[in-house]
């Protein structure tokens, strides 16, 4: 059995880019079209996006399903196909009467959540099984950077082709993106899994989902990492919906100016991912616990950047907001890649029969945190603004986020010797 080389890792990055491209249709493009072109309440797309996160609570089910067979590629391809079908179903629902439109939108976003969960979980499990330990941080960086590129390219392409806008053109553009993503996924995964399959396949796991879940959660390392993923991703996502309003309300920025801050933030994220990917692979060891320094640095750095935003909320214009947000993006990128690298390491160092289940558990924790994060951040600001000044309201939320990141950093510091613990457990079994 051989592991994945860099070309194979890049091929899986293309799959991640394909997933990101279709998700962009659902969470960004359709969001705007529903509200602006079709006059729906903003709560409708917000609720549908929340629904697609809720569906991903079933990630452990799909991860366990892929563990029970000898191949994850069908789960990846099938997931992307379901994801694309869900996006197209949502597009077809737009011009219908309210009742059938809402029914199809609900079904479409259920399929979108299911497709993301099945494809994403199996993809990460395949990476965890096939990438050498010392390459996992870099592999996480490559795949996530390519996912961002997929979002950027598909967004730019759709924006250019949808001028002037019509529903028929939306169908063509969305269908083209979904079909291209599926074809890329099929080509990118063609015979890829053969490179990591042993000459004699391991027996198929017959353990039930309940038994497998109990076995994983019996491990202290797995329980701690699940809590870490939830806390850190909750902190990571809380500022998503409030940064631009913060820039407008407290700093008096125009929509164009606040949007430019988003570009600064995402540029910082990409730079942080690159630095953590290179540094984590070049200088970190082979176990998940040995990435804890990078994880903790990303969490502490993110907490300090959020503390800076809290200070800036009190000062207002004159605070170096763009630089502060750039630092936040950079430290978020460092945290994200190192955490994903550790996730792959913990899954890859565990029992081969439950790699997908582990990725599913942590993916579900991430999905819950993402769904709650954006919503709680926005609601928290709204409630705080009723009780105190705008600046103090944002200070409260940013300070809470910083505390969450510090709590995650404490959890990260305890992620040590995980591989040894798992191996000892296996030896005792």
Image (tube, rainbow, N blue to C red):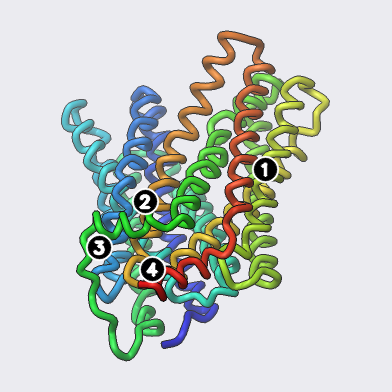
- Measuring from the top left, give residue 94's x and y in whole percent: 27, 35
Q: Which of the 4 image quarters holds residue 141?
A: bottom right
Residue under label 2, please give it: 173
Look at discs 3 and 4 and give the one toward the viewer.
Answer: 3
Decide which of tag 1 and tag 2 comes sooner along the chain: 2
10 Å neighbourhood of mark 1: few (<14), some, or many (≥20)? many
For residue 316, above or below residue 10:
above
- Camera-nearest residue between 259 and 278: 278
Residue beneath the point at 58% across and 34% down? 239
User: Helix, strand, or loop for circle 2?
Assistant: helix
The label on residue 184 is 4
- Camera-nearest residue between 103 and 338: 338
For residue 18, above or below residue 379:
below
Q: Residue furthest right?
A: 318
| Cα distance in 3D space between marks 1 and 2 | 37 Å
10 Å neighbourhood of mark 3: few (<14), some, or many (≥20)? many
Residue under label 3, please give it: 65
- Measuring from the top left, give residue 387's x and y in whole percent: 58, 8
User: Helix, strand, or loop for circle 1?
Assistant: helix
| Cα distance in 3D space between marks 3 and 4 | 24 Å
């Amino acid at each position: 059995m051989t592991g994945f080389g860099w070309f194979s890792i890049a091929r899986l990055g293309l799959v991640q880019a394909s997933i990101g491209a279709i998700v962009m249709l659902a969470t960004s493009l359709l969001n705007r079209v529903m509200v602006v072109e079709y006059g729906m309440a903003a709560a409708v797309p917000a609720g549908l996006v929340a629904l697609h996160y809720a569906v991903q609570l079933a990630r452990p089910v799909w991860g366990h399903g892929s563990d029970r067979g000898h191949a994850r590629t069908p789960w990846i391809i099938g997931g992307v196909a379901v994801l694309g079908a869900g996006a197209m179903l949502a597009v077809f629902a737009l011009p219908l009467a309210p009742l059938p439109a809402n029914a199809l939108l609900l079904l479409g976003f259920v399929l979108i959540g299911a497709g993301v969960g099945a494809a994403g979980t199996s993809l990460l499990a395949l990476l965890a099984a096939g990438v050498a330990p010392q390459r996992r941080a870099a592999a996480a960086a490559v795949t996530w950077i390519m996912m961002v590129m997929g979002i950027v390219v598909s967004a730019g392409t759709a924006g250019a082709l949808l001028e002037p806008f019509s529903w028929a053109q939306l169908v063509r553009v969305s269908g083209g993106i979904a079909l291209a993503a599926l074809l890329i996924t099929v080509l990118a995964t063609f015979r890829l899994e053969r490179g990591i399959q042993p000459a004699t396949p391991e027996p198929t796991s017959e353990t039930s989902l309940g038994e497998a879940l109990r076995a994983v959660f019996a491990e202290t390392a797995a329980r701690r990492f699940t809590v870490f993923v939830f806390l850190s991703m909750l902190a990571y996502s809380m500022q998503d919906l409030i940064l631009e309003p913060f820039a407008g309300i407290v700093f008096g920025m125009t929509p164009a100016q606040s949007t430019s801050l988003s570009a600064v933030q995402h540029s910082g994220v990409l730079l942080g991912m690159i630095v953590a990917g290179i540094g984590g692979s070049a200088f970190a060891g082979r176990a998940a616990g040995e990435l804890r320094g990078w994880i903790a640095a990303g969490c502490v750095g993110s907490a300090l950047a959020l503390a800076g935003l809290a200070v800036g909320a009190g000062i207002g214009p004159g605070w170096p907001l763009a630089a502060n947000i750039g630092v936040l993006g950079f430290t978020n990128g460092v945290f994200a890649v190192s955490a994903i690298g550790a996730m792959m390491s913990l899954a890859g160092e565990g029992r081969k029969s439950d790699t997908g289940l582990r990725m599913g558990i942590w993916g579900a924790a991430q999905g819950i945190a993402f769904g709650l994060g954006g919503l709680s951040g926005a609601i928290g600001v709204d409630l705080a603004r009723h009780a105190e000044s705008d600046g103090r309201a944002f200070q409260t939320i940013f300070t809470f986020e910083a505390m969450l990141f510090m709590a995650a950093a404490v959890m990260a510091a305890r992620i040590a010797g995980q591989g040894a613990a798992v191996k000892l457990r296996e030896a005792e079994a």
